[in-house]
Image (cartoon, rainbow, N blue to C red):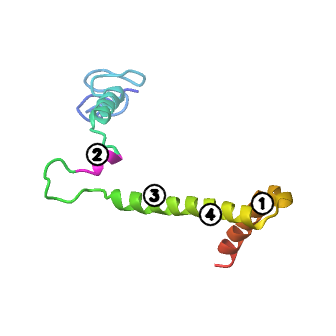
Amino acid sequence: LGLGSGSDGFGAGGIGGGASGGGVGSVNAGGVADRAGRWTRRLLQRPRLTPAQLSTNPSSSSTPPLLNIRGPTLYFFTLYFLMATQDIAVDGWALTLLSKKNRGKGPICNSIGQNIGYFLSYVGF
């Protein structure tokens, strides 16, 4: 789509041509295709930062990091460690409480109890 001539694509002739003679359907040096190409090149040349790069500031060691991931990482590691420990403890407790005949029903009771706990935590609290 030719939009005339000029640096912004809207030359003296406006839509349909101008001094360069480019009409509708022609692409000239200041046209839409050239602007799209420049925009694409600028977009591809921008530096990309990953979360790991954002967590450190290489310019100065005295400034705090831009993104603190140590705190949430430590928190969730501790939380999942305690949840795994509780799961192991409950399974061991079930083995000591249930008779040999009913030990196969222990995981079923554990699953039902966990779902009841989920339900009560979402509905009750």
Image side of residue 105 versus residue 37, left or right: right
Sequence-wise, the earlier of marks 4 and 2 is 2
Q: Earlier in the sequence, mark 3 or mark 4?
A: 3
Judged from this view, the residue extending furthest toward the right is 101
Give residue 106's mark: 1
Residue 86 percent location from the top left of the image: 59, 64
- Name the residue tied to disc 3: 77
Q: Is residue 58 magenta?
A: no
- Toward the viewer: 71 or 106? 106
Q: Earlier in the sequence, mark 1 or mark 4?
A: 4
Secondary structure at numbered mark 2: helix
Q: Are marks 2 and 3 in contact (CB under 8 Å)?
A: no
Three-letter code, disc 3: Phe
> Magenta region: which residues?
51-56
Percent coordinates x, y for residue 109 in the rendering:
78, 63
Across and down, in percent, residue 37 comes to 32, 27
The reply to whether the C-beta atoms of the residues labelled 1 and 3 are less than 8 Å apart is no
Label 2 vs 3, first from the N-terminus? 2
Spatial separation of the CA atoms under disc 1 and disc 3:
28 Å
Image height of 88 relative to 13, above or below:
below
- At 42% from the left and 63% from the top, the residue drawn is 75
**Is 83 situated above or below 40?**
below
Q: CA distance from mark 3 to mark 4?
A: 18 Å
Query: Which residue is identified by label 2?
Result: 53
Looking at the rendering, in which quadrant would you find the C terminus? bottom right
Up the image or down, 49 lies above or below 27; here it is: below
Mark 4, residues whose alpha carbon is within 10 Å: few (<14), some, or many (≥20)? Answer: few
Q: Amino acid type of disc 4?
A: Ala
Amino acid beneath label 1: Gly
Query: Which of pointers 3 and 4 indicates the residue nearer the eye?
Result: 4
**Badge 2, how many Cα within 10 Å: few under 14, some, many 20+?**
few
